[in-house]
Image (cartoon, grey):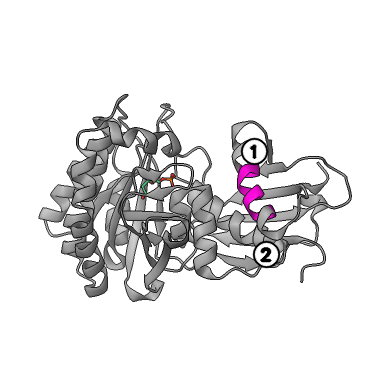
Amino acid sequence: MNPEYTATALAHPNIAFIKYWGNRNDALRLALNDSLSMNLAALHTRTTVRFLLDGSQASDTLVLNGRAIQGDALVRVSGFLNLVRQRAGVDWPAHIISDNNFPTGAGIASSAAAFAALALAASAALGLHLTEKELSILARRGSGSACRSIPAGFVAWHAGVEDGDSYAETIAPPSHWNLVDCVAVIQSAHKPVGSTAGHTLAGTSLLQAARVADAPRRAALCRQAILDRDFEALAVVTELDSNLMHAVMQTSTPPLLYWEPQSVEIMKSVMRWRQEGLPVCYTLDAGPNVHVLTLSDSVDEVEQRLRAVDGVAEVLVSAPGGAARLEPSPKDLEMKGFNQ
Ligand code: PMV
């Protein structure tokens, strides 16, 4: 049991090679297609959850990267915690402290790591012993892609058709392949439409039905490329899948254009570099940053080339990452913000 009703968990964000875009059920975040991803070892969210039984606060509180958070973000987190509270049969408010080790506001999708860490910390704090599958299903309710940040390494999300069969599992451990993600962080003043809103627009694009219909074929190619450590095969299907998702985004109503001129410049450079023999390919999520995949031998070269592109603020380099995991909770919780 957990007499303090406190737990701390760490989870990595993930980058999808085969993307999730559009739900069959928005409330349950049931994806329309299977997706495949890799966890990012160098980046993580660490979250401590304490449930308070002493009446010291009436509702949930959240401190994110040292700042007290209110509004929509807190409502979303509270709604998610309600699922965990219901499961444990309690109604206690919680105090949550969450920190990312990667630059905030840089447009790195953090909701996957955030809800994976929150699912694990909150369920452990309430003494629920969930299996990896159950945790993945729970994390999915916070953010679809969060279900892929629960298992280790290279991960497949089986879209399924209902709550109980839509979850992610490892297809290969982190050590399977020396693939590296170099995230070129683009300076951008533009505030993009978030993915929760974006998923609801996917069906307004004429291209979404075609993207979804062909997804099983792409997922099979991608899975085989990962299992065979076949970089060229991975490159071709990953770029195709990213382009298809962005084609859907760009042709939805209203249209979503996440690319900045520097994003396009990098995509074109990556295509050229690959033709010249460098193992590189690109993929982009719901933002302008370009994830450039390569192999460990070529990381220095790729990083150097990306840094030379005008408008690239930073390059974050990450090998395949492990599963979400529990960590010892800090002893100095007051110091860390529990008394705010
Ligand atoms: O989990 P969400 O709702 O943030 O959606 C993630 C969507 C993409 O990052 C664009 C694609 C993906 O599969 O990660």
Q: Where is residue 165 in the image (x, y as percent from the top left)?
A: 42, 62
Q: Where is residue 287 in the image (x, y as percent from the top left)?
A: 37, 38
- The residue labelled by disc 2 is 124
Check the image and name the residue furthest to the left: 275
Q: Where is residue 153 in the image (x, y as percent from the top left)?
A: 41, 68
The part of the chain drawn in magenta is: 77-85
- The residue labelled by disc 1 is 74
Q: Position of residue 267 (x, y in %)?
A: 22, 43
The answer to whether 163 appears left or right of 233 in the picture is right
Indicate which disc, 2 or 1, sits on the residue closer to the N terminus: 1
Instruction: Report the residue at 37% width, 54% height from top.
Output: 15
Nearer to me, 244 or 336: 244
**Element under disc 1:** helix
Nearer to me, 226 or 81: 81
**Element under disc 2:** helix
The answer to whether 40 appears left or right of 135 in the picture is left
Instruction: Report the residue at 26% width, 73% height from top.
Output: 227
Residue 41 shows which numbered tag?
Answer: none
Is 225 contained in the magenta span?
no
Nearer to me, 149 or 143: 143
Q: Which amino acid does label 1 sit on?
A: Leu
Query: How many residues crowd mark 2 within 10 Å: few (<14), some (14–19), many (20+)?
Result: many
User: Is the residue indicated by label 1 positioned so its CB lies within 8 Å of ligand 1?
Assistant: no
Label total for image: 2
Marks 2/1 in contact by CB < 8 Å: the verdict is no
Q: In which quarter of the image is residue 181?
A: bottom left
User: What's the CA distance linking mark 2 and mark 1?
Assistant: 20 Å
Q: Which amino acid does label 2 sit on?
A: Ala
Quadrant of the rendering where the N terminus is positioned: bottom right
The answer to whether 257 appears left or right of 93 in the picture is left
The answer to whether 267 appears left or right of 125 in the picture is left
Quadrant of the rendering where the C terminus is positioned: top right
